[in-house]
């Protein structure tokens, strides 16, 4: 569809409704703000009322509008208005909160993404996602903030409560049972109660996990979009595919729980693994599951087996062997993106890029975990000078060989479990291309570690470290960029692995 039609082509009646909606929402916010000021209500109370009222009003859009164009403009305008409100401190009834967040900006941003992706053919997903954002997320916050002694936990930065998470899950499930069967006709679908319950259970768990893991209001974006993707995987699909998604969900949950208990993962890492695992296992099936599991368990075991030998380098490393959410996302985020792209535009090419991304992080992990056992001192990949063991950017012959083996293991696991996916080009060529890409990406990781990754000097012990805090105080930056840590480098390395596969396969095919 031409861009002009997307932005401007809509019936006159829709533009009139747009004006009414826009003025109605703004009037509602204005009245709420004046009422708050007059009665002395806490700004947080008004923010919740606006959150719920606006979301319920948006829910009706699919019934009233013929075109998505006015809705796109509505979302864009409120993104701008809310951003200015947060930056200037005005409209406390909308933005007032004890912590500084951009949650009110993420709210219309989520609506914009949903309108752009779901308006044609997936209105049910759009409407249910907005209801989860408007009601379930708000109820979780209301309960969590008003209990006298909630069972609090912190996964990233923000405090959450077990009671709030339980309310979010239960509210979302009730919404699916009460609303989904009644609006399914909008997409020419029907839902018996048991199917609504089935989809609701999976979606509610994923949305709740996103809310628990969020910080700074990001759940206003991640929870509805995560829920929307799970509904996309299950609504309108054959029962067999729904079973695959469900099995992937429970496998991801099992891996996450057992890994936290074994201390392979921190609690935040467990939640992130559950989310990424549900995505990869559920949407990808066995073919996409095997390589990521091979990476996860082999790297985790190597990390534990070498823990004693690596303990003398712990002052260098920013992160410990127990992976947190940032490490899990850095290692699996690009792979998860390939799965999402394949679910929208199915093609074997995405599988090649997926293997390249996983091969890269496995190669790098093996190089790090095995390289510390080298009898030879590492050399900087940038200067080729000898550097201490554990230094970012240091490489050894043993570590490089381990990197090659780690990359090869991923490709072999993919080839054994899904030989049919190797259909873009001759299997042998693809096989070696992905192995080479994984090895090259691991070396790129070392180069990035030696150049742009932040390295600090402790002002007390004078040791070089990746940690911004050492010996109880702040460290001094001596190399790299303070915003680039080991997680950033791992994410880039994974992207390099996928990108090299793309370049090499395209070059070979041509």
Image (spheres, helix red, strand yellow):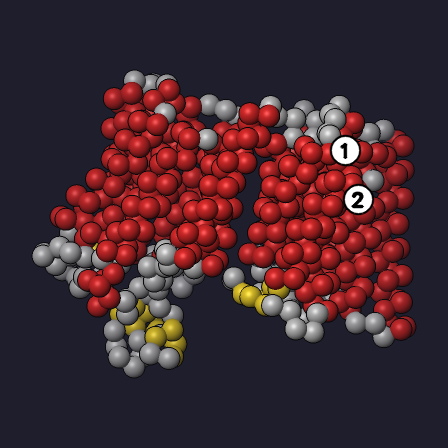
Q: For mark 1, does the 10 Å Cα neighbourhood hold few (<14), some (14 to 19), or many (20 or more) residues?
A: some
Quadrant holding the N terminus: top right
Above or below, 41 relative to 290: below
Residue behind mark 1 = 181
Residue 333: x and y in percent read 45, 45
Tell how many labels: 2
Q: Position of residue 510 (x, y in %)?
A: 34, 18
Residue 54 in sight in this render: yes
Question: Looking at the image, which residue is at 41% across and 52% down?
Answer: 258
Q: Which of the numbered marks, if any, corresponds to residue 58? A: 2
Of circles 2 and 1, which is in front?
A: 1
Q: Is residue 232 left or right of residue 89?
A: left
In the rendering, which numbered label is found on residue 313?
none
Q: Residue 354, located in which quarter of the rendered image?
A: top left
Give the farthest residue toward the bottom.
Answer: 460
Residue at far left of view: 375
Residue 20 to residue 120: above or below? below
How crowded pointer 2 is (Cα within 10 Å; few <14, some 14-19, many 20+) is rated as some
Left or right: residue 264 versus residue 61 is left
Q: Element under label 1?
A: helix
370 to 125, vertically: above or below: below
Residue in the foreground of this view, choosing between 47 and 112: 47
Q: Is residue 434 left or right of residue 74?
A: left
As rendered, which of 181 and 75 lies closer to the eye?
181
- The residue nearer to you, when weighing 204 against 69, is 204
Q: CA distance from mark 2 to mark 1?
A: 19 Å
Q: Residue furthest front?
A: 194
- Identify the residue at horizontal 23%, vertical 49% (top origin): 367
Q: Residue 110, percent across and down?
A: 67, 46
Image quarter of residue 183:
top right
């Amino acid at each position: 569809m031409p861009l002009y039609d997307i932005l401007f082509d809509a019936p006159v009646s829709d533009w009139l409704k747009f004006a009414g909606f826009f003025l109605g929402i703004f009037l509602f916010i204005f009245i709420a703000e004046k009422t708050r000021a007059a009665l002395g209500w806490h700004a947080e109370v008004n923010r919740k009322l606006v959150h719920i009222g606006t979301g319920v009003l948006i829910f009706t859009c699919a019934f009233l509008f013929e075109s998505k164009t006015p809705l796109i403009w509505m979302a864009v305008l409120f993104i701008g208005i809310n951003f200015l409100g947060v930056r200037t401190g005005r409209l406390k009834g909308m933005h007032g909160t004890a912590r500084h967040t951009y949650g009110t900006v993420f709210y219309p941003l989520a609506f914009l993404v949903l309108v752009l992706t779901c308006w044609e053919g997936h209105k049910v997903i759009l409407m249910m996602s907005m209801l989860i954002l408007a009601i379930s997320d708000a109820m979780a916050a209301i309960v969590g903030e008003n209990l006298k002694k909630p069972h609090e936990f912190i996964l990233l930065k923000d405090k959450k409560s077990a009671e709030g998470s339980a309310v979010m899950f239960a509210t979302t499930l009730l919404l699916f049972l009460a609303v989904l069967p009644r609006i399914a006709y909008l997409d020419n679908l029907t839902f018996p109660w048991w199917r609504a319950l089935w989809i609701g259970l999976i979606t509610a768990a994923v949305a709740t996990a996103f809310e628990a893991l969020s910080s700074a209001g990001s759940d206003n974006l991640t929870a509805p979009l995560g829920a929307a993707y799970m509904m996309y995987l299950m609504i309108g699909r054959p029962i067999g595919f729904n079973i695959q998604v469900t099995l992937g969900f429970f496998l991801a949950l099992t891996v996450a729980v057992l890994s936290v208990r074994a201390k392979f993962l921190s609690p935040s890492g467990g939640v992130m693994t559950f989310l990424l695992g549900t995505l990869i296992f559920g949407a990808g099936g066995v073919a996409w599951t095997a390589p990521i599991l091979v990476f996860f368990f082999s790297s985790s075991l190597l990390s534990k087996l070498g823990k004693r030998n690596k303990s003398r380098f712990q002052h260098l490393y920013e992160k410990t062997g127990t992976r947190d959410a940032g490490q899990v996302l850095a290692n699996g985020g690009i792979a998860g993106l390939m799965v999402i792209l394949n679910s929208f535009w199915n093609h074997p090419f995405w599988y090649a890029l997926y293997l390249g991304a996983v091969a890269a992080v496995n190669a790098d992990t093996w190089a790090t975990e095995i390289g510390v056992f080298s009898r030879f001192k590492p050399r900087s990949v940038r200067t080729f000078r000898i550097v201490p063991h554990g230094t970012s950017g240091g490489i050894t012959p043993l570590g490089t060989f381990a990197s090659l083996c780690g990359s090869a293991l991923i490709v072999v696991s993919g080839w054994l479990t899904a030989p049919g996916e190797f259909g873009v080009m001759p299997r042998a060529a693809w096989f070696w291309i992905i192995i080479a890409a994984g090895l090259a990406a691991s070396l790129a990781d070392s180069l990035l570690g030696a150049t742009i990754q932040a390295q600090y000097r402790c002002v007390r012990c004078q040791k070089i470290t990746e940690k911004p805090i050492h010996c109880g105080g702040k460290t001094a930056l001596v190399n790299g960029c303070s915003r680039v840590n080991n997680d950033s480098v791992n994410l880039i390395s994974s992207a390099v692995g996928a990108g090299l596969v793309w370049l090499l396969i395209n070059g070979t095919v041509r």
